[in-house]
Image (cartoon, grey):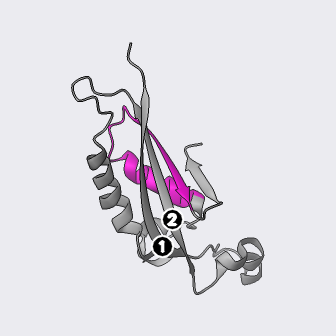
Amino acid sequence: MKQKIAVYRKEHFNAAHRLHNPLWSDEENKKVFGKCNNPSFHGHNYELIVKVIGYPDEQTGYLVDMKILSDIIQDHVVEKFDHKNLNLDVEEFKDLNPTAENIAMVIWNILRAQLDTALDLYVTLFETERNYVEYPA
């Protein structure tokens, strides 16, 4: 009987952002987003955990080759986000507020396009040691 298993890959990137809604006044943005609305931006040391679930290959025993998974994350996420200003340097956030929730969903969409659709995919993103999001919920 085949059984599903989960594998995890942890990666890290640093990025700056500003939480801001251009449809709101400066006062409303400051009220809702506080220090995260700083016009000079602010940064985080993000921890990313990618979880992949599925059935291991009968020939290799692998669910997914972890080196390949690492390369996909490095090439498509870390290279794109690391040491970048998400608001200014990352196309996906041109018109999308780079909250932790939105960053996690963008990363999921990027990775989903790179992985076999038979595999379930979850993204957990730590913005701080105490604040993190998971997508999908």
The furthest residue to the left: 59
User: Residue 11, image x and y in percent?
Assistant: 41, 58
Residue 19 is left or right of residue 7, and the answer is right
User: Residue 130, image x and y in percent?
Assistant: 65, 60
Q: Which mark is residue 92?
A: none
Report which residue position mark 2 lands on. 46
Seen from the viewer's position, the closer of residues 21 and 133 is 133
Mark 2 vs 1: CB contact within 8 A: yes
Q: Residue at x 76, y 76 (%)?
A: 28
Q: State which quarter of the image contains the C terminus.
A: top right
Q: State which quarter of the image contains the N terminus.
A: top left
Q: How crowded is the residue under tag 2: few (<14 C-alpha within 10 Å), some, or many (20+)?
A: many
Give the amino acid at mark 2.
Tyr
Query: Is 15 above or below relative to 47?
Result: below
Asked whether 22 falls inside the magenta stretch, the response is no
Q: How many marks?
A: 2
Residues shaded magenta? 101-126
Asked whether 108 falls inside the magenta stretch, the response is yes
Helix, strand or loop at mark 2: strand
Q: Quadrant of residue 4?
A: top left
Give the amino acid at mark 1.
Ala
Report which residue position mark 1 lands on. 15
User: Residue 14, image x and y in percent?
Assistant: 46, 71
